Image: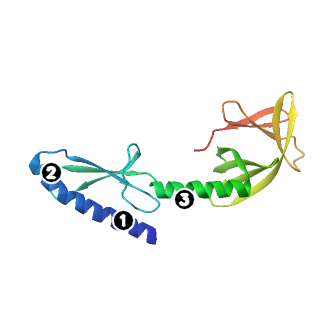
Amino acid sequence: MKKVILFTIVIISTLFLISTGCEKKRELGEAKNIDLYICPECGDTIKADTTDANTQYVIGKGLEYRVTQHLQLCEKCKEKKAKQEAAEERKLGKIVGKWNINMPKGVYTIRNKNGAIKLYTVYSDGSSDIKDLIEKTKNGQKRLYVKGNDFGEYFIVEKDGKLGMYDNDGLISKLNKAK
């Protein structure tokens, strides 16, 4: 909550400063569009070349200026995120892949730490599960079986990057990669 309030204050104060500058630019006949780049983690206004537009604000009473807010991590937050990901990889193992699951909604993440392969499942309600996987090669394909599952179900990381879910009868479904 504190972060949201701080973020809102930063946006409002930045927009005010930009709007007062816009009045001067308007008198000089300069451009009317302004791009505002904000780090979603710390709220800092940053310089950026390419981002994804998130929200548009129109500022100033009677002014014809459009401010487009773009969310992109600043360099400090990118470094912090990279360090966190590296620490997580050392602790949990290298990520083999991530895939979206639909029923129930969530994400599968397969990690390999020194040959120990695990399936991490995080559901949209916040609950999670971890299962040990056993890698077996059959007909030249690497199959990942859930340890203790006697039903013959297994996963294959497909060449197109999707995660194939199989049983003794064949393909059950394919999951798309998560972003």
Q: Which mark is residue 8?
A: 1
In front: label 3 or label 1:
3
Which residue has dot 3 on it?
80
Label 3, label 1: how many angstroms apart (C-alpha)? 23 Å
SS for tag 2?
helix
Q: Which mark is residue 25?
A: 2
Q: Decide: is 137 above or below 119.
A: above
Q: Which mark is residue 53?
A: none
Q: Quarter-wise, where is residue 84 in the image?
A: bottom right
Task: Find residue 39 and report its horizontal and vertical position in percent.
Answer: 42, 57
What colouring does the structure picture have?
Answer: rainbow
Q: Residue furthest top?
A: 139
> Closer to the camera, 108 or 72?
72
| Contact? badges 1 and 2 (CB < 8 Å) | no
Q: Amino acid at mark 1?
A: Thr
User: Residue shown at 39%/61% (left/top)?
Assistant: 44
Q: How many marks?
A: 3
Disc 3 or 2, which lies upstream in sequence? 2
User: Residue shown at 81%/35% (left/top)?
Assistant: 142
User: Residue shown at 88%/43% (left/top)?
Assistant: 151
